[in-house]
Structures are given as structure tokens and as C-alpha cells.
Image (tube, rainbow, N blue to C red):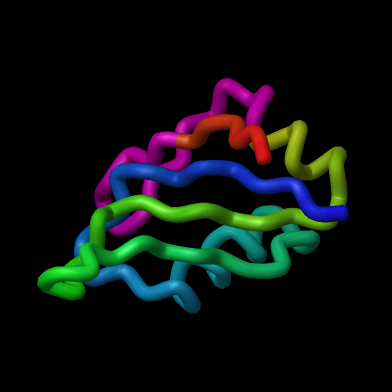
Amino acid sequence: MKYTIYVGNLPKATTTEEVTDYFKKLFPSVTGTKLLNDPMNKKSKCYGFVDFIKYNEYQMILSSNRQYTYKGNQLIIKYVLI
């Protein structure tokens, strides 16, 4: 089973691999990331989704009061209901 979080306020030039690597260093059970782009101009919408395979790590990121900063942007992290 996989667990997914929403990650917002990402820098425009961020790649999927960069976000996956960032979260994988903090939470080894991260399996991947999907970033969304505008279909018209192909530019980043500055948000995406990160998948975890371990429930305890997923819960940890959602319940912690820690603020995550990536390339100078304070990230918005939210629960996703799938």
C-alpha cells in the first residue's frame, strides 16, 4: 500500500527527481514524486504529490510541527485522501 502527501509552494524550476531525493533523505520509504505542470504552457504549477510505503513515516511528516524548506521556499504539506 502507498501513502501520499500533497506538497505545495515548490520552486518553479524543481524537478521530480530533486523532490524525491529531498524527501528520501528525510524519509527512506519515499518511492516517488509526481509534479504537476500546466498542460498549455508546460510550466510547473509549483505543487505535486510524494508517495511513501511506510505508514509511520507518512504519519510522521503529517503530524510533526517541523517546517520543511526547499530551495528557500517553505513547503506546504497536507494529507491526501485517495
Magenta segment includes 66: yes
Q: Vertical placement of 31 versus 58: above or below?
A: below
**Quarter residue 16 falls in:** bottom left
Residue 24: x %, y % from top left: 65, 64
Farthest residue, direction front: 40
At 23% from the left edge and 69% from the top edge, which residue is drawn?
39
> Residue at 85% of width from left, 42% of height from top?
55
Residue 52, by quadrant, is: bottom right
Question: Residue 65: x percent and y percent?
Answer: 57, 21
Nearer to us in this view, 47 or 74: 47
Position of 1 with respect to 59 (left or right) is right
- Which residues, given as a range, are shown in magenta? 62-76
Furthest residue toward left: 41
Quarter of the image that includes the N terminus: bottom right
Q: Compared with residue 39, is residue 79 higher up or lower down, i.e. above or below?
A: above
Count of numbered circles in the view:
0
- The verdict on residue 23 being magenta is no
Q: Is residue 25 left or right of residue 43?
A: right
Relative image position of residue 23 (x, y in whole percent):
59, 58
| Picture quadrant of residue 36 | bottom left
Quarter of the image with the C terminus in it = top right
Residue 31 place in picture, x, y as percent: 71, 68
Q: Is residue 39 left or right of residue 28?
A: left
8 relative to 17 in the view: left or right: left
| Camera-side residue of 64 and 20 | 20
* 79, 61: nearer the viewer: 79
> Residue at position x 64%, y 64% from top?
25
